[in-house]
Image: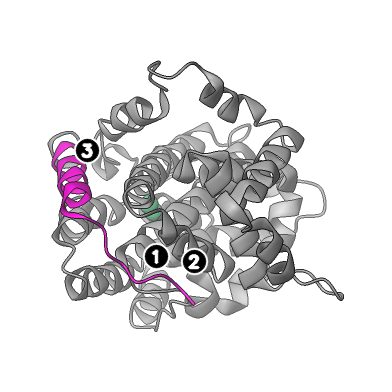
């Protein structure tokens, strides 16, 4: 169950303003013209992380390339949902900024595969097969569902590209540089989607239900487009040294930044656990929720603070303890980030 989307006009204006600022200053996009025509990437095969075979490494690069080449599929799914909801700001952002930006992202990975000796027309044929595939969106359809999906997806892609670039760097600095160029755009996309989500939740706090629903049901697009590759991603992430604790903390930080309050954060965590049905046993999350929701929802505030303390994010709510009248930095930070 999710909340009916009813963001007030003042927040729509804020979202439109954010998109206008992003359009005015989208930052430096990936410049594929600056990339070399060919890079010899075979050297990396002698210096792969422990336990990673040549086939694994090719799989990693293919997963990145195939999920990046499907921009049109994601873009039409997002624009259709934005138009259905009358969210012109989201359709504009998606069509005018995000889509042209994403069009460039598959290129470094294709160059890496070509540099290993792959045949270009074979790669192009496989790319067009993926581009004609079906992307299954497992989440909801409101604008806040879409921006939450975008936030999580961009964060995970950013992280994945970062691990690839770090793996490439010692032997192939040029290929690493191209990959970092894509990674830094994913970071910016994640920040934009986070800010859009935060504005909607601030305007209609019950939307934490939708945010929780989206996080609980989240699936990377590779699951539907290239399942044979995506199913191996966890193993590959471990080989490349992914720190799952860090990913969890960073996702937790994003969830906090979306709510900007320990109480809403606590509620978001509980809703997510509840919707994911993560807990087995006699006490179910919805029993805990019932207790948490006693007058004023103070239980959520305690839970939120406890999680923030436990994950080293306590500093984020401590700013809430400042005397009234002292502005907190989060909203200003959000605006500054939106300027890229
Ligand atoms: Fe991308
Ligand atoms: Fe992106």
In the picture of the structure, the residue carrying the numbered disc 3 is: 26
**Viewer can see residue 159:** no
Q: Is residue 32 magenta?
A: no
Measured as percent of width and height from the top left, residue 88 is found at 14, 61
316 with respect to 208 (left or right): right
Q: Is the magenta stretch mostly helix, strand or loop?
A: helix
Query: Can you say whether 66 is above or below 188 in the image?
Result: below
56 with respect to 217 (left or right): right
Q: Does the residue labelled 1 lie within 8 Å of ligand 2?
A: no
**Of callouts 1 and 2, the N-terminal one:** 1
Query: Can you say whether 314 is above or below 204 in the image?
Result: above
Measured as percent of width and height from the top left, residue 22 is found at 20, 39
177 with respect to 321 (left or right): left
In depth, the one of 151 and 87 nearer the eye is 87
In the picture of the structure, the residue carrying the numbered disc 1 is: 145
Tell me the element at label 1.
helix
Q: How is the image coloured?
A: one colour
Residue numbers of the magenta segment: 1-21
Q: Is mark 2 within 8 Å of ligand 2?
A: no
**Viewer can see residue 73:** yes
In depth, the one of 53 and 189 nearer the eye is 189
**Of callouts 3 and 2, the N-terminal one:** 3
Viewer-nearest of discs 3 and 2: 2
**Of callouts 3 and 1, the N-terminal one:** 3
């Amino acid at each position: 169950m999710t909340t009916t989307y009813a963001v007030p006009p003042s927040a729509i204006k804020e979202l439109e303003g954010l998109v206008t600022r992003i359009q005015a200053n989208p930052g430096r996009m990936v410049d594929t013209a600056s990339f070399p025509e060919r890079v010899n990437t075979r050297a990396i095969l002698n210096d792969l992380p422990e336990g990673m075979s040549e086939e694994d490494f090719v799989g990693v690069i293919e997963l990145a390339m195939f999920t990046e080449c499907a921009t049109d599929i994601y873009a039409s799914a997002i624009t259709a949902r934005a138009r259905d909801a009358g969210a012109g700001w989201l359709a504009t952002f998606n069509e005018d900024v995000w889509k042209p930006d994403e069009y460039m992202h598959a290129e470094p990975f294709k160059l890496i595969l070509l540099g290993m000796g792959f045949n270009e027309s074979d790669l192009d044929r496989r790319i067009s097969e993926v581009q004609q595939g079906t992307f299954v969106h497992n989440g909801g359809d409101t604008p806040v569902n879409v921006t939450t999906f975008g936030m999580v997806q961009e964060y995970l892609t950013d992280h994945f590209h970062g691990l690839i670039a770090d793996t490439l760097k010692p032997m192939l600095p040029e290929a690493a540089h191209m990959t970092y160029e894509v990674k830094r755009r994913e970071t910016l996309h994640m920040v934009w989607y986070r800010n859009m989500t935060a504005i909607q939740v601030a305007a209609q706090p019950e939307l934490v239900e939708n945010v929780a629903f989206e996080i609980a049901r989240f699936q990377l697009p590779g699951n539907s487009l290239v399942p044979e590759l995506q199913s191996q991603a966890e193993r590959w992430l471990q080989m490349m040294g992914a720190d799952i604790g860090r990913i969890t903390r960073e996702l937790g930080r994003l969830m906090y930044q979306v709510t900007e309050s320990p109480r809403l954060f606590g509620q978001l965590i509980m809703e997510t656990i509840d919707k994911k049905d993560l807990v087995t046993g006699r006490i179910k999350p919805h029993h805990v929720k019932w207790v948490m929701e006693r007058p004023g929802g103070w239980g959520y505030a305690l839970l939120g603070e406890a999680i923030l303390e436990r994950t080293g994010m306590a500093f984020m709510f401590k700013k809430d303890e400042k005397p009234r009248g002292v502005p907190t930095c989060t909203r200003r930070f959000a605006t500054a980030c939106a300027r890229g």
